Amino acid sequence: MVSTRSKVPSCGWPSLTGYLLGFAKELWGNVLSLCGIMRNVSTWDRELDWATKLLRGRSLIVQVLKLALVGHVYGLWCERNSRLFEGRARLVGDVLNDIRDTIQIRLNNWSICKTDSRNATLCASWGILS
């Protein structure tokens, strides 16, 4: 079995320290909460293992979580660079809104079955219109 971890760039939580590590965990916790997943955020390795095992298929929740994971890593990278090179810091909510905007744009005009209560709740949480 080939490890998926070797294919993932090292821009996750292991390379973060101090305040930014707390920022990353809070942001990911907010993403999970918007998806209706209520659990404690663990280490980067455990979160990556969780995502690798469970984010399969084409369901709405899987698509949202995949987009959110990519947006999370990209948002952390931008936040890290902004703090290091520009001396500016953003709030978790601002980065979360960027992720939300991206998901809304990517899933715009998708054919989503909103008679499924889980999909309807997910669309309401993320502001997805279709």
Image: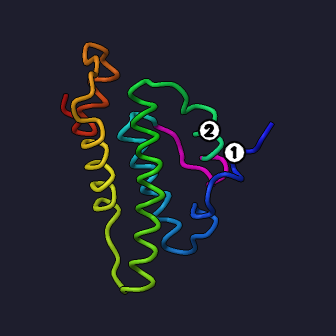
Residue 46 percent location from the top left of the image: 65, 47
Look at mark 2 in the image and give the residue it sits on: 52
State left or right for residue 114 relative to residue 35.
left
Q: Are marks 1 and 2 in contact (CB under 8 Å)?
A: yes
What residue is rendered at 46% in x and 50% in y? 70
Q: As displayed, is residue 38 above or below residue 101? A: above
State whether residue 81 is above or below residue 34: below
Which residues, given as a range, are shown in magenta? 38-47
**Kind of residue sitting beneath label 2:** Thr
Q: Residues within 10 Å of mark 1 (few under 14, many from 20)?
A: few
Determine whether 56 is above or below 86 in the image. above
Residue 53 located left or right of residue 25: right
Q: Is residue 29 magenta?
A: no
Q: Give the residue at mark 1.
A: 4
Which one is in front, 109 or 81? Answer: 109
Examine the image and state in which quarter residue 88 appears: bottom left
Compute the Cα span from label 1 to label 2.
8 Å
Using the image, determine if residue 16 lies above or below residue 71: below
Amino acid on which the number 1 mark rests in the picture? Thr
Of the image marks 1 and 2, the number of the one nearer the N terminus: 1
Asked which secondary structure carries label 2, the reply is helix
Residue 39 lies in the magenta stretch = yes
In the foreground, 15 or 25? 15
Q: Position of residue 100 (x, y in %)?
A: 29, 48
